[in-house]
Amino acid sequence: MDKRTVIAVVLAVVVIVGSMIVQQVFFASDEKTPAQTTQSTADKVPEPVTEEQPAEEAEPAVEEQQPGAQEGDAEELAATNDQQIEEQNFTIETDIFRIGFTNRGGQITSIELKEYTNTDGSPVEMIFSQEAGVDPFSIHFGDADAPAVDALFRVERSLVGPGVTFSRIFRSRSGIPFTLKKSYLLQPRDYMIELQVSIENSVNEYPDLNYNGYAYTLGFGPQIGPEFEKLDRRNEFREYLYFADGKKQSMRLKKETKQINTRVTWAAISGKYFAVIAVPDATQYLITYDTRQMEGVNEQSSFYFSRPEIKSSKNTDVFRFYLGPKKLDVLKSYNDPEKNTYNLADMNFDKIATRNVMIGWLVEILKFFLELFHRVIPNYGVAIILVTVLLKVLLFPLTRKSYESTARMQSLQPKMTELREKYKNNTQKLNQEMAAMYKKEGVSPLGGCLPMLLQFPILIAFYSLLNTHFALRGAVFIPGWINDLSVPEAVITFSPINITRNFQFDAIRALPFIMLVTTFLSSKLMQSPSTDASGRNMKMMTYMMPIMFFFILYNMPSGLLLYWTMQNIFTVAQQWYINHRRQKKNAGGSPGPGPIRKKK
């Protein structure tokens, strides 16, 4: 096999491996696996009876709410309990939130972020329940598989600030009465909600709440907002994270449950631009992440905190939930107690906005220059173009050297053909002579491949930046065409057509076709004029690469397509400039298309 064929094969392997990496990053498979079948806690132990406790055991507040209750009226009170408590749905607003509450289970039904909107102008909704019939902040007596408590609670609105307390008296399976309270505390200018879960017994005896070692479980699910069509890792994704022992840990879940039985600083479900971060108290909870298929919701992303058995007559657990944007300045405010109303310090929430990838340093460099250019010209599309120009200028010496190496390889074609003919029956000798010629002429067979290889990490870094940098959400480049650089642009949209499992055709997009043409021109200018087998292989790659990138990038964010298209245009301009200078120098009598040397 001659050298040029080897080069073509190596180049093909590099492109194929690179495309596989891109495929893995961009089109991560999300195959559905059967839901795990676990025996429900309700099948193992009896569900707590939601009866009203006898009058002599009731707290004064309960007696006031039920006037005339006597000792012998316990059974009647139990039967009419839910009739005496009317179902209530109400809203509490802060400067940050508009929160919908229900006394059915004392849960939250809606959390709207007043400072952020969707493309239609509506507020971003952080709760995405669809028709699951489950709301966040649910209480389950037992572990995560126990049914959620859906009894009606009494409501007491806070008089000192935004907040509400839900309370209800239950009786454990051994007959011990206890009061369950859920108190929500809000701050006017904070993305955090504090929830206090209290279990109290007025007769100084701890309730018999031990279901396989757990008293109760606090759940958040079945999904975080805002609304989405599919978790395709392009328009939306989910990451399951927790922070323990000073390190961020991440997990991959595919329609399954995973548990953490260690003390954590926080646990989180993170989306593309928004996240829910739960901060439990010092109790060592069993944390369960659940992505199994759930009826009534397309995708489940829930997590649960199971509390060990309570061995006191009065107990209060404190949970805090951050529900907001993945903006670094907001997340970092929880590292400084003077910058958040809960006086939290060193929480490291900002770790969820950074991804543990090998090219994370490159992402940070691109972000720095992107923000720098955006401050000069407040348009992120223009900023992406300026970053592309900067990259081409910085890499120009290397690119020019690569082009010159390609030109030198072309000038050596007659000698290479002569050597192949001379040593056609001695492959070992041919390779030795070829290597000696390359060394003597100062060229490398792979010199022309380097600029192409450099584009892969930059491409992946740009994709990661578009998926993590909150400022790019809804960033407009050209109004009416590219209205959001973080999602694909579209000229015409229609009903989706599934071409393959990973490729869906649902719109005519202009940028991918412009990219196709510019990629072809860029590859064409790099093509060797050789007519041998290696030249034909290179010519085949000239046509294969643009088509391959067309399908890989077709449904990618428009900001990524803008970068790739502009770098192709600048590459064509650079190649034209180098060719023009070489032709001009050759016309002046210089021997052959050798390297361009600077004038002293």
Image: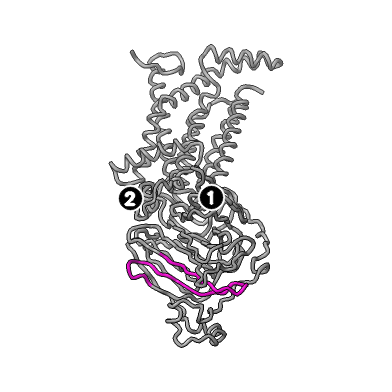
- In the rendered view, tell whether residue 592 sits above or below residue 246: above
- Amino acid on which disc 1 is placed: Arg
In front of the other: 259 or 9: 259
Q: Which image quadrant: the C terminus? A: top left
Which residue lies at the image location 52% right of the left edge and 29% below the top edge? 527
What's the mark number on residue 389?
none
Q: Residue at x 60, y 29 (%)?
A: 10
Where disc 2 sits, the SS reads helix
Dividing the picture into quadrants, the one containing residue 388 is top left
**Along the line of sight, the residue nearer the viewer: 240 or 421:** 240
Q: Which residue bears the numbered disc 2?
A: 339
Q: How many marks?
A: 2
Q: What range of the chain is rendered magenta? A: 157-184
For marks 1 and 2, the one nearer the N-term is: 1
Does the segment drawn in magenta span residue 180? yes
Q: What secondary structure characterizes most of the magenta part?
A: strand
Residue 315 spot, x, y in % from top left: 50, 63
What numbered label is drawn on residue 263? Answer: 1
Q: Is residue 217 magenta?
A: no
Tell me the distance, in whole angstroms, between the alpha carbons under discs 1 and 2: 26 Å
